[in-house]
Image (cartoon, rainbow, N blue to C red):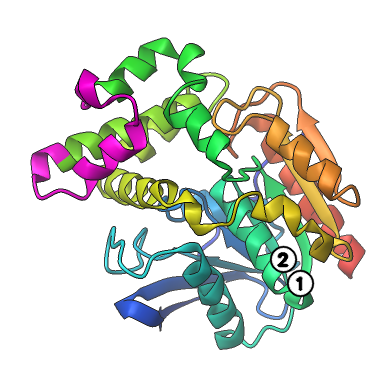
Amino acid sequence: MRKLFNAIQPHVTHTLPVSDGHRLYIEECGRKDGLPVVFVHGGPGAGCELWHRQFFDPQTWRIILFDQRGCGRSTPHAELAGNDTASLVADMESIRRHLGIDRWVVFGGSWGSTLGLVYAETHPEHVLGLILRGIFLCRPRDIHWFYQEGASFLLPDHWEDYLAPIPEAERGDLVSAYYRRLTGHDEISRMAAAKAWSLWEAHASTLLPKPVVVDHFGNPHTALSLARIECHYFKHDSFLDRDQILANTGRLRDIPGVIVHGRYDVVCPVEQAWMLHRAWPEAELHVIPDAGHSALEPGIVDALVTAAGQMAMRLA
């Protein structure tokens, strides 16, 4: 079973001003003249982590990571103004041009798969390949499953913690109830809501408990950006048309693609990967039998590292 490559450090970092006062953190690792790959993190609002660099052979790949608007090392932190899907797609194009790259491989999981797909459907001429994990189509029913009713039946203990900040009278629309608190002026209420929202996702992300995931999601800096930005997007239907991703898969026909999804993914049930594969049959689909949602699941790590290696050989 393949494991992550050894830890590496970036050889250069960039700060890129974009629209609406946002400034993006970008880093480059690996081979300076290597095959370019952009890592698209999840959330929205999660930011990159150090181990995200390690899915790729640094002797082969020019590895580009960036923190999306409002999260990680990008500024201003947890900012919602000017933060929407079209802006993130435009940011990826700004990064590509800034780095002098014509075409790159797009590698993303969870919300990273959402943004990666929307980017590829908008700019297919600049995408060499897609490696996607934990497919998130961002349909209203996908949000309802995880944040209103569905996953709640599988993790009732953690669901009670998620419900705790919200009075019973407001629980008929939990995303809206959280949105009011996460955008309100009461700092204590805002932070309590952020941690409850973020930890619900953390506990649901792995097949077996993984403290490193819970610790990361529970970090106040991460929790605030993740909860505020996710809730902002989901309150506004992720700034996507209904079934937009599936409707536009015809634009992916000529792009090599690999889809990796955990069989027991509670955050984004495997039906989403199945529907994407039905709409885009040219892509490979790998359902990992003993995995949940997280990219740290051993079977998912193996599949993603293998997919990156095979993609590099295919494009060489």
Residue at position x 64%, y 40% from top? 134
* Residue type for callout 2: Glu
Residue visible at 59% across and 58% down in the picture: 115
* Magenta-drawn segment: 165-189
Residue found at x 53% / y 40%: 140
Please name the amino acid that badge 1 sits on: Pro
User: In the image, 186: left or right of 114?
Assistant: left
- Residue 221 numbered tag: none
Identified at 23% across, 18% down, the residue is 168
Q: Residues within 10 Å of mark 1 (few under 14, many from 20)?
A: some
Q: Above or below — where is 55 with respect to 201?
A: below
Instruction: State the mark number for residue 124.
Output: 1
Q: Secondary structure at mark 1?
A: helix
Q: In the image shown, does 222 or 302 lie closer to the viewer?
A: 222
User: CB atoms at circles 2 and 1 under 8 Å apart?
Assistant: yes
Could you tell whether 113 is left or right of 251 in the image? left
- Helix, strand or loop status at disc 2: helix
The residue at which mark 2 appears reads as: 121
Q: From mark 2 to mark 1, how far is it between C-alphas?
A: 6 Å
**In the picture, which quadrant includes the N terminus?**
top right
Q: Is residue 2 something one can see in this rendering? A: no
